[in-house]
Image (cartoon, rainbow, N blue to C red):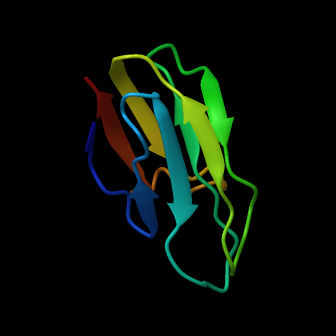
């Protein structure tokens, strides 16, 4: 899979053969953040919990295609906390 980095997050792509992908917030911050993954219709397929420190994981089963990942906190996606995930 190809992943474009979202500002403030690190995405660790799991086993492509199993089609599982793990999303992790990158570092402790004073504001809470999360990561959601949506398909091309905008349907959210998976999402981490909101965290300001520590780690929150979400496992998302994806088929080949293009997905969007982003922070769901109001204003964060618009500020650039989003990216594209392409599963081949």
The residue located at (39%, 48%) in the rendering is 13
Q: Is residue 76 visible?
A: no
Q: Between residues 69 and 62, which one lies in front from this camera angle? A: 62
In the rendered view, tell whether residue 53 sits above or below residue 48: below
| Drawn side of residue 1 relative to residue 68, left or right | left
The residue located at (57%, 56%) in the rendering is 75
How many numbered marks have been drawn onto this rendered protein structure? 0
Please state, as top left, top right, bottom left or bottom right, where the N terminus lies in the image.
top left
Q: Where residue 68 sits: x, y (%)?
A: 42, 34
Q: Where residue 12 sits: x, y (%)?
A: 42, 56
Q: Where residue 69 sits: x, y (%)?
A: 47, 42
Q: Is residue 45 visible?
A: yes
In the rendered view, tell whether residue 30 sits above or below residue 26: below
Please state, as top left, top right, bottom left or bottom right, where the C terminus lies in the image.
top left
| Drawn side of residue 37 relative to residue 14, left or right | right
The residue located at (58%, 51%) in the rendering is 35
Q: Between residues 75 and 87, which one lies in front from this camera angle? A: 87
Q: Residue furthest top?
A: 41
The residue located at (42%, 64%) in the rendering is 10
Q: Where residue 47 sits: x, y (%)?
A: 67, 43
């Amino acid at each position: 899979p190809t992943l474009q980095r979202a500002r403030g997050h690190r995405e660790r792509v799991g086993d492509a053969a199993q089609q599982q992908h793990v999303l992790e917030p990158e570092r402790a911050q004073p504001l809470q953040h999360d990561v959601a993954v949506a398909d091309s219709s905008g349907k959210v397929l998976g999402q981490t919990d909101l965290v300001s420190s520590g780690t929150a994981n979400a496992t998302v089963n994806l088929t080949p295609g293009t997905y969007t990942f982003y922070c769901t906190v109001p204003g964060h996606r618009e500020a650039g906390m989003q990216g594209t995930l392409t599963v081949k």
